[in-house]
């Protein structure tokens, strides 16, 4: 079994199509993207004892349940940072297999937590073990895709990371349908659903681990000739992960990702109450709006990262920040006009750039640090996501509460927040503008 | 040592199968989301 997982076993033979690699990456990302749809379990988890309604004093409260997702995202960042170097050493198959075991196993452990009605076991399952699976799975195909698609690294990683955006679209209805199937008069069906999803996701992710291949050293696509004079920021040198974290470029990109995600995640998590309170649509229409922005979040990941191959990574982020700042600043106007089409259009544009920010960063890292340890560097950078996952919603909720406490009408409660988020994006623009090529003293001098 | 010992091109069927394997669930998820989104336009 060990040898089956080794890097040496997955070096592609001549003639192997590189178009088999994105499906392998998608098999992983479509599964772990389920994390964004975990909220479908929130209410059922508060009724495990009461079944039809939450039993006060015995059932878990909704606020307690929401910690599970936060713990999972923190462990995503930590595991991506910790295991990135290991991934580069052992190759993507072993990392994907480990991710499948952790993510699928996390569901099964959580199922045990549900059966025992033990919250620590539930958190240890989906939050900790599942979170480690998320981190490992997220970074596992990235450097492999970049090596297979040196001519289109943005598009290649965009395809995989688009899968993460699409994962919730599969995971949410799957979870709801399974709970409906397994529910009985004496049970919510969550236990059985968790077990089933653990098995399904493990099997699906295993497909990715089996299909993935790495290109032989020095492989290039047929007919591909690297440009004689690469773009200013694109290096032909290599930088190790340990050297990368000593460069200012790493911290600038950390800030770029943190600021872009903080702004977007704040809007994403409050989209439903925001559209109801500002432009006055119904709860059902708001739910439709949440679905619509998830489509744009997913589509933006592919669109912007593919575009970055043409216009360059720095220019793409400059667009995210400048266009983003303008769009955020226009949201209060749309809300004031009570214009649903304008409001929806603006938030959809914001969501494309939120998703695009995730999808473009691996190629940006490749441009600056080379391909040698780009997976490990990407893993370390993802701590920015964990931090933004906490900071973004905190900021937007705090600002809204301050506004309503000071007597601002509910429909205007998000206005100041939107202007602040526009300011946050301007700071991101400055950080991006400061990115310069990595100093040669950080370049790797030895042999791989 | 690599998994395949013969030098051969990946078959179009294998590529199509791999894309369908991931594409069909994604299509199902997207269609579910589009249906849900329609509530916004009613």
Image (cartoon, rainbow, N blue to C red):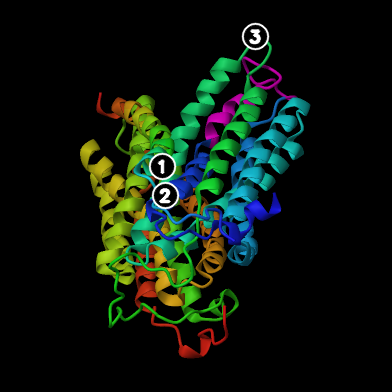
Q: Position of residue A24 (x, y in %)?
A: 47, 48
Outermost residue, bottom side: A441
Measuring from the top left, give residue A161's x and y in whole percent: 43, 51
Q: Write down the residue under mark 1.
A: B14
Tell me whether the residue at label 1 lies in contact with that at label 2, contact meaning CB atoms closer than 8 angstroms. Answer: yes
Element type at mark 3? loop
Disc 3 crowd, CA 10 A, few/some/many (<14, 14-19, 20+):
few
Q: Let me know if marks 1 and 2 both belong to one chain.
A: no
Assign the magenta stretch its main secondary structure: loop
Of all chains, the one bearing label 2 is A
- Residue at image x 48%, y 61%? A144
Residue occupied by mark 2: A20
Name the disc covering residue A3, or none.
none
In the rendered image, which quarter contains the C terminus of chain A?
bottom right
Magenta stretch in the rendered image: A38-58
The reply to whether the magenta stretch includes residue A42 is yes
Q: Nearer the viewer, residue A109 or A205?
A: A205
- CA separation in Å, label 3 and label 2: 46 Å
């Amino acid at each position: 079994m060990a040898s089956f997982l080794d890097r040496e076993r997955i070096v592609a033979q001549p003639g192997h199509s590189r178009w088999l690699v994105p499906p392998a990456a998608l098999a992983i990302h479509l599964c772990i993207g389920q994390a964004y749809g975990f909220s479908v379990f929130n209410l059922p988890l508060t009724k495990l004892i009461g079944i039809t309604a939450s039993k006060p004093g015995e059932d878990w409260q909704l606020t307690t349940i929401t910690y599970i997702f936060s713990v999972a995202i923190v462990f995503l960042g930590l595991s991506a940072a910790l295991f990135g170097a290991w991934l580069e050493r052992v190759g993507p198959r072993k990392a994907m297999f480990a991710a499948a075991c952790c993510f699928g196993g996390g569901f099964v452990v959580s199922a045990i937590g549900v059966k025992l009605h033990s919250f620590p076991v539930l958190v240890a399952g989906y939050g900790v073990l599942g979170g480690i699976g998320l981190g490992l799975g997220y970074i596992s195909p990235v450097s492999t895709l970049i090596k297979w698609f040196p001519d289109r690294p943005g598009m290649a990683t965009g395809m995989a990371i688009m899968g993460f955006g699409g994962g919730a679209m599969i995971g949410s209805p799957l979870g709801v349908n399974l709970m409906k199937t397994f529910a009985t008069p004496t049970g919510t069906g969550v236990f059985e659903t968790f077990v089933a999803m653990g098995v399904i996701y493990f099997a699906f992710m295993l497909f990715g681990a089996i299909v993935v291949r790495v290109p032989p050293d020095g492989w290039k696509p047929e007919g591909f000739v690297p440009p004689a004079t690469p773009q200013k920021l694109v290096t032909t040198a290599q930088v190790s992960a340990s050297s990368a974290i000593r460069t200012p470029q790493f911290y600038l990109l950390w800030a770029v990702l943190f600021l872009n995600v903080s702004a977007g995640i704040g809007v994403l998590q409050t989209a439903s109450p925001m559209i109801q309170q500002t432009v006055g649509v119904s709860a059902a229409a708001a739910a439709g709006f949440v679905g619509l922005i998830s489509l744009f979040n997913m589509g933006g990941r592919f669109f912007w990262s593919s575009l970055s191959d043409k216009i360059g990574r720095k220019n793409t982020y400059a667009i995210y920040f400048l266009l983003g700042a303008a769009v955020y600043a226009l949201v209060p106007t749309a809300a004031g006009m009570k214009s649903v089409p304008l409001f929806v259009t603006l938030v959809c544009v914001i969501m494309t750039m939120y998703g695009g920010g995730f999808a473009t960063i691996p190629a940006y890292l490749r441009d600056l640090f080379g391909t040698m340890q780009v997976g490990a560097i990407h893993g370390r950078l993802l701590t920015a996501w964990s931090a933004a996952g906490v900071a973004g919603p905190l900021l937007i909720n705090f600002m809204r509460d301050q506004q309503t406490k000071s007597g601002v009408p509910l429909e205007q409660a998000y206005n100041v927040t939107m202007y602040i988020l526009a300011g946050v994006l301007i700071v991101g623009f400055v950080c991006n503008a400061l990115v310069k090529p990595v100093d040669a003293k950080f370049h790797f001098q030895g042999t791989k | 040592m690599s998994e395949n010992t013969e030098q051969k091109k990946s078959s179009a069927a294998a590529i199509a199968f791999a894309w369908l394997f991931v594409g069909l669930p994604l299509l199902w998820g997207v269609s579910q989301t589009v249906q849900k989104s329609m509530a916004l336009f009613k």
